[in-house]
Image: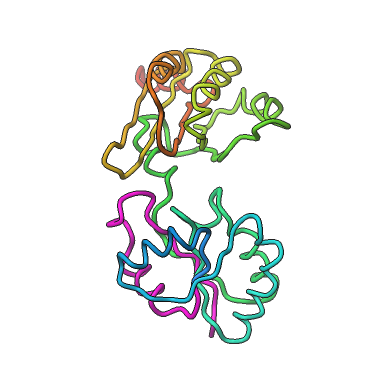
């Protein structure tokens, strides 16, 4: 039976792709790529020659029905994004929903996702967390921050390097400058960095340097330090 495969791709280090992902990319009829040039580089590295079509946030609304029809007609199709797992702050959700509603089988492979290593490596509680992805750039940003002020779970955000310091300053304003956090960038790459400390410390650190690479910010939940202290005493 034909199906849609969601195939995670490396977020930096090309060795992070799984053997199963490589097999699926070789076997499917078509690969949908967020950027065919970037995916083409990965396929060349893996020695795979496959027909590709663009599938990104600007055209997915127009193409999902046609793609679902092709799968229903017998084609196996893989969806990849530029890096990481499709659907996590990347195109994927709309196509998955279309296929599910049409009774088409969907299979998501496990694999790279930037927020998981950043969260686990942060030193903050990761048994319960909330993933917020990218905050709204303008409309709704303040409302979202206010809604998270009393969030007790560890919070995970994606951010552009150009807006990192601004985001940290906003977190300090709404959550308190002593709230613990970590910033991970260039994950799995040669210059990978994770910086931990209070929001005030992180603002000082990143205000003094040029910031490059994709960013994951992990912020402790409200009351987390009090809970840590109580557990230590017990």
What residue is at 52 percent from the left and 26 percent from the top?
221
Determine the residue positioned at 55% across, 40% down: 133
Screen quadrant of the C terminus: top left
Front-most of residues 138 and 174? 138
Q: Is residue 169 left or right of residue 9?
A: right
Rendering quarter of residue 67: bottom right
Visual colour scheme: rainbow
* Of the pair 59 and 146, the residue shown nearer to us: 59
Task: Give the mark count.
Answer: 0
Specify whether residue 202 is painted magenta.
no
Residue 15 position (above or below residue 162): below
Question: Which one is nearer the viewer's eye here, 94 or 138?
Answer: 138
Image quadrant in which you'd find residue 103: bottom right
In the image, the segment drawn in magenta is 1-30
> Is 13 one of the magenta-colored residues?
yes
Asked if residue 25 is positioned above or below residue 60 in the image, the reply reads: below
Q: Residue at x 43, y 17 (%)?
A: 207
Picture coordinates of residue 87, whole percent (x, y): 56, 55
Residue 116 position within the rendered picture, expressed as x and y whole percent measured from the top left: 41, 44
Residue 8 picture location, percent across and down: 43, 59
Image x and y of residue 6, in percent: 50, 65
Please determine whether, in this image, residue 213 is positioned above or below residue 224. Answer: below
Left or right? Give the position of 110 relative to 162.
Answer: left
Relative side of 4 to 125, left or right: right
């Amino acid at each position: 039976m034909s199906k849609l495969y969601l195939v995670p791709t490396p977020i930096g280090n090309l060795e992070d792709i799984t053997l199963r992902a490589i097999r699926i990319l070789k076997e499917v009829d078509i690969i949908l790529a967020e950027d065919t040039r970037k995916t083409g580089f990965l396929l060349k590295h893996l020695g795979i020659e496959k027909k590709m079509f663009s599938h990104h946030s600007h055209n997915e609304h127009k193409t999902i029905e046609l793609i679902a029809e092709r799968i229903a007609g017998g084609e196996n199709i893989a969806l990849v994004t530029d890096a990481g797992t499709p659907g996590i702050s990347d195109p994927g959700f709309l196509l998955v929903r279309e296929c599910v509603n049409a009774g088409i089988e969907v299979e998501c492979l496990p694999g790279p996702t930037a927020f998981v290593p950043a969260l686990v490596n942060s030193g903050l509680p990761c048994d319960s967390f909330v993933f917020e992805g990218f905050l709204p750039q303008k409309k709704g940003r303040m409302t979202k921050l206010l809604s998270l002020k009393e969030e007790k779970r560890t919070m995970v955000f994606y951010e552009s390097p150009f807006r990192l310091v601004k985001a940290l300053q906003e977190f300090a304003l709404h959550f308190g400058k002593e709230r613990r956090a970590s910033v991970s960038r260039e994950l799995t790459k040669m210059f990978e960095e994770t910086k931990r400390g209070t929001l005030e410390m992180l603002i000082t650190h990143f205000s003094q340097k040029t910031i490059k690479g994709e960013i994951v910010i992990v912020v402790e939940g409200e009351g987390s330090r009090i809970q840590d202290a109580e557990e230590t005493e017990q």
